[in-house]
Amino acid sequence: MFYRGLFTCLFCLTTLHSVFAQSPAKITEEVREILTYPYNDPNPVVSNTSKIFPYTTFEGYSKDGTKQKWKVVKLENDYIEVYVLPEVGGKIWGAIEKSTGKEFIYRNEVIKFRNIAMRGPWTSGGVEFNFGIIGHHPSTSSPVDYTIRTNEDGSVSCIVGNLDLPSRTNWRVEVRLPKDKSYVETRASWNNPTPIHQSYYNWMTAAAVVTDDLEFFYPGHLALEHDGSPTLWPIDGEGRDLAKYKNNAFGSHKSVHTVGEYNDFMGGYYHNSKFGFGHWALYDEMPGHKLWLWALSRNGGIWEDLLTDSDGQYMEFQAGRLFDQYSPSPSVKSVLTQVPFSPGITDRWSEIWFPVKEIGGINEVSPLGALAVRNENGKLFVGVNSFSFAEGTIEIKSNGKTLFS
């Protein structure tokens, strides 16, 4: 559809939804055999670091995989599928957009434990829930409590949770799939039942596959280092546009906390396959937007070999309750990077994780949908990707003049 005036306006409305009534969402439990590279050999010393007391660490990691049975919870509606692993930290294993068959949350088809987390074992992919002292938290690779339920509104939920012993706090995450939305929601509840202040650390760590055509959409004009010091984003001091994945082929791994714009979303888009992924939460609840990249050199490729067999390299889009992931520095002190968890407090917040398709990028998001706008060669492209079926009128205006309706 075109409006001919000072420029050409091309409008695209893409929906993952049928106009027909949606079926109720479904939730099932099953046991799957998944190729697993296990961990073992617990250190006899209760803890070699005060950060994870009273847990042990693990020193043994297998180089050979074997089929192992794992409990898998599947949540499904007409538009997406979501998988949860209660025995691997309660993490979301992965998520698929059904009309394309593409993953908007990277699902590693092997469980390959490697020495990365606080206690040692960690496996890549999915959405990992981190509460307590620092990531990756002590129960990230061990079973947690869980329950499933079908809700009165037709949605389904898998609720996972655990007691974090180093911080003495309790956390719960409800992984909720509505019957009529093309996103999955996580509803977190975190409680400090102790009479003293505890460490306040929360980051929800999601993974997505990387390709050379991937572009990141992280609002902001600055990035914070772990100690709170600022750098430029997305154009760095050398003039490189770091929002393009392929332009990060220098140096080592990248850890970027973007700031400088009051906005509620982050995500990525694969221009060749016309597909993307994203996260939305109220900025006041989740101001932390982190981009993590393994080095594009062999320095990062080694970890692709260590963490997966055939699913390829990935990136992480991480959402946090604070602006960045605190790391002590003698030169930088900031209340923006570390705060205490007050005694007797319970915090609650919600987030959504979603796919997008066929709109060219992500410039604005709400729980109703995603918007992409770009100006290319004198043509204004406007794309709207609906997360639910709705009826209404969309108008595109410039200086009060309606260009398209």
Image (cartoon, rainbow, N blue to C red):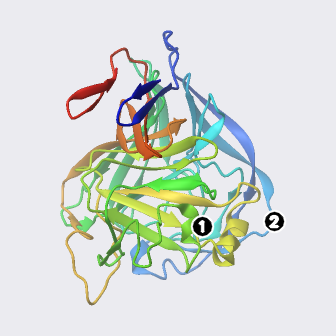
Furthest residue toward bottom? 330
Quadrant in which residue 207 is drawn: bottom right
The residue tagged with tag 1: helix, strand or loop?
strand
Where's residue 234, x and y in %? 40, 65
The residue under the point 48% across, 10% down is 21
**Near-viewer residue (145 or 265):** 265
Query: From the viewer's perspective, is residue 2 above or below residue 263?
Result: above
Q: Is residue 189 visible?
A: yes
**Which residue position holds label 2?**
64
The C terminus - image quarter: top left
**Near-viewer residue (300 or 87):** 300
Quadrant in which residue 357 is drawn: top right
Circle nearer the N terminus (1, 2) = 2
Contact flag, marks 1 and 2 (Cβ < 8 Å) = no
Query: From the viewer's perspective, is residue 223 above or below residue 362?
Result: below
**Which residue position holds label 1?**
121
**Near-viewer residue (350 or 28):** 350
The crowd level at tag 2 (other Cα within 10 Å; few <14, some 14-19, many 20+) is few
Where's residue 102, x and y in %? 64, 39
Three-letter amino acid code of the residue under disc 2? Asp
Where's residue 354, x and y in %? 47, 39
The residue under the point 34% across, 53% down is 170
Where's residue 222, x and y in %? 31, 68
